[in-house]
Amino acid sequence: MRDNDPVNWDGRYGAWHVFRYADVVPVLAEPLIFSSDLSELVPPQPEVELFNRGNFARMDPPRHDKLRRLVSRAFTPRVVADLAPRITAVTQELLDAVAGEPEFDLVTALAYPLPVTVIAELLGVPTSDRALFRTWADALLTQPLPDRMVPDEESMRLRAAPLGDMIDYLLAHIRARRAAPRDDLTSQLIAAEVDGERLVDDEIVGFVGLLLIAGHITTTTLLTNTALSLDEHPDAARDLRADRSLVPSALEEVLRDRAPFPRLARVAMHDAAVGTRTIPAGQILNLWIGSANHDEREFRDAGTFDIRRHPNPHLTFGHGIHFCLGAPLARLEAAIAVPILLDRCTDLVVADGAELFDARVMAGARRLPMAA
Ligand code: HEM
């Protein structure tokens, strides 16, 4: 498709598909022409509407910029860097629990509990509730691709139940922090002001929910994808074990090759050109990050897994104003956890029984047995 029909209208699915790097980037760079707010197109749903009041990933400027500024103030590079000792300690503790086991599920042992513990501690929600957070993340982010781009009322209703549970849980947490602030991100968001304006609880709930869900399941998949890639490419695994300075570039290559979110969605605000096609106002575009990251026009030997690739301008964290706010945290968690995992397990191979997500929705594993 990338060669023959790079901007393609899928009538059955009800959306455009955009496959080339050079076509995806300009769409992401123009948020006023290609909006992230798809709310007008989906059947109205109270839980979704409430959640989206603070979910700035689905907002356009100027509101997006204002809310993002507010979170960025609490979620600074310094805050992230200061987490390194805690990330190391949690990783060690989790791997201690499976030390000596001939086989363990990487998701249960490390890839899920590490990022969820880090983000839960940041937000001040109890890590003991992490099984609950996982059911929400599963329900909201990892369900198989539906038949139609715009969900019908029934699939909206199915998503509404877990979303409603998450909203109730987080509203109770926010109210508790409003009454008795602590040293966590939720309390900082409650206190933060932008242009003299403070957020109300209904807005904070979307913020906190976005950070909680986006802040763990994606990093879980980065860790499982690293294991899958190294298993698939034993030469790369050997080189990485021999030279740990390759870890950052190896992780970028895993991100390029197996983008956790392979697809981003936008809607055209007015008739607009993408490649050689004109997208009519009101129609949805699926931007295939997984395809753009393998576009030979942008990446030399795009089909080769090269842990020394440089530069590596993959689009896995997005591009433009919505560029992933948590990218530094995800990178730090993986850069700490992967070397520890390699040190602890001298032989690390994927065993039988892996369960992968629908790769068109999320690239990663739900279960990944490893023989150590
Ligand atoms: C946005 C991917 C980890 C929080 C995004 C976007 C992508 C992405 C592609 C852009 C969405 C769009 O343009 O529509 C990833 C991947 C991760 C990861 C692949 C891990 C490997 C995290 C973490 C956090 C986080 C750890 C939080 C701590 C966010 C937020 C946004 C976002 C808040 C919205 C930014 C905005 O709209 O301005 N992420 N993410 N992400 N991500 Fe991440």
Image: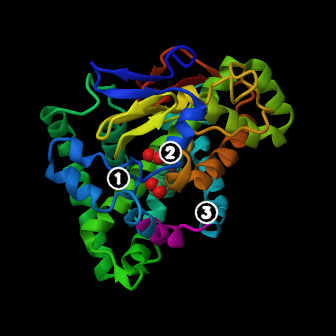
Queried whether the magenta region covers residue 255, the answer comes back as no
Residue 28 numbered mark, or none: 2
Residue span colored magenta:
67-76
Q: Position of residue 309 (x, y in %)?
A: 78, 33
Expressed as whole percent of the image width and height from the top left, the position of residue 169 reads 25, 59
Labels 2, 3: front one: 2
3D distance between C-alphas at marks 2 and 3: 26 Å
Label 2 CB sits under 8 Å from any ligand 1 atom:
yes
**Left or right of residue 323: residue 192:** left
Where residue 280 sits, quadrant-wise, is top left
- Per the image, the residue denoted by label 3 is 80
Screen quadrant of the C terminus: top right
Classify mark 3 as within 8 Å of ligand 1 or not, answering yes or no: no
Q: Give me the disc on residue 129.
A: 1
**What secondary structure is marked by label 1?**
helix
Provide residue 179's location: percent of width, then percent of height: 28, 82
Q: Is residue 225 above or below residue 156?
A: above
For marks 1 and 2, give the CA distance. 35 Å
Secondary element at tag 2: helix
